[in-house]
Image (spheres, coloured by chain):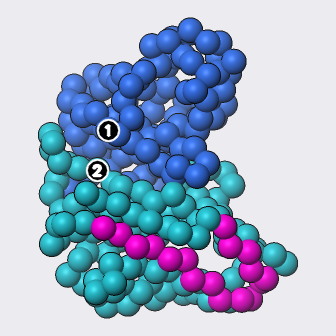
Chain colours: A blue, B cyan
Amino acid sequence: DVKVTQSSRYLVKRTGEKVFLECVQDMDHENMFWYRQDPGLGLRLIYFSYDVKMKEKGDIPEGYSVSREKKERFSLILESASTNQTSMYLCASSFRGVTEAFFGQGTRLTVV
Amino acid sequence: AQKVTQAQTEISVVEKEDVTLDCVYETRDTTYYLFWYKQPPSGELVFLIRRNSFDEQNEISGRYSWNFQKSTSSFNFTITASQVVDSAVYFCALSPPLPFTSGTYKYIFGTGTRLKVLA
């Protein structure tokens, strides 16, 4: 079974903290994605990566950065967490080309 | 611009009823792919189906069926004889045909439809 694992299910952080969300996939997928899910807004793409060290901004990259040093790992970084970044964060991966994406279980981040 | 619209925010049905979830998309591409995902309360999106734009045949998988109509840019999802376990948020998504290289794409999701199946 394809496995996409996010490091935490729930996180509570303080405003101004630097926050790392980690995602690991075990299927040798080229593509990895970070989405943010908010009620009424669906899934919005923050960043995606199509290869090691390669990244592309999605629709809402402001306030976020990413790192992909190894093929299986894609990290989302909140440089200085703010309350408006309280949300559910979903990581996904897929093979190159148009195939289905496999999702992690999500990280519910609360910034206080 | 590419866009996916799921106009139904929430639907409630009684168990054993049939229910259809609507999905309307916009794209200028002649080749594209459409997807449906299910998000149960556990949070993980689960892949249900992928269709490409050249294949307009309806698909049936058990109690699930999908109706793809290019003429109306719709890709609707029907659950027959719904069950409580079908309660979830369902997302429709669109993707262009090319591999995901720099400057090209990624999946475009609708806002989701929350389905509640009552016992």
Q: Relative to residue A108, is residue B44 depicted above or below?
A: below
**Secondary structure mostly taken by the magenta-highlighted segment of the chain:** strand
Residue beneath the point at 58% across and 27% down? A84
Q: Which residues are magenta?
A: B10-26
Give the quarter of the figure containing the N terminus of chain B. bottom left
Pinpoint the chain carrying mark 2: B
Residue A58's disc number:
1
Residue B74's disc number:
none
**Contact? badges 2 and 1 (CB < 8 Å):** yes
Image check: B32 left or right of B113?
Answer: left
Residue beneath the point at 61% across and 29% down? A86
Question: Is residue A3 something that shows in the picture?
Answer: no
Q: Relative to residue B72, is residue A72 depicted above or below?
A: above
Amino acid on which the number 1 mark rests in the picture: Gly
Could you say which quadrant of the image residue B53 lies in?
bottom left
Residue beneath the point at 42% across and 52% down? A102
Residue B83 percent location from the top left of the image: 72, 79
Amino acid on which the number 2 mark rests in the picture: Lys
Residue beneath the point at 69% across and 83% down? B82
Q: Which of the two discs, 2 and 1, sits closer to the camera? A: 1
The local secondary structure at tag 1 comes to: loop
Q: Relative to residue B82, is residue A57 depicted above or below?
A: above
Image check: A82 left or right of B33?
Answer: right
Which residue is tagged 2?
Answer: B106
How many numbered discs?
A: 2
Question: Is residue A7 something that shows in the picture?
Answer: yes
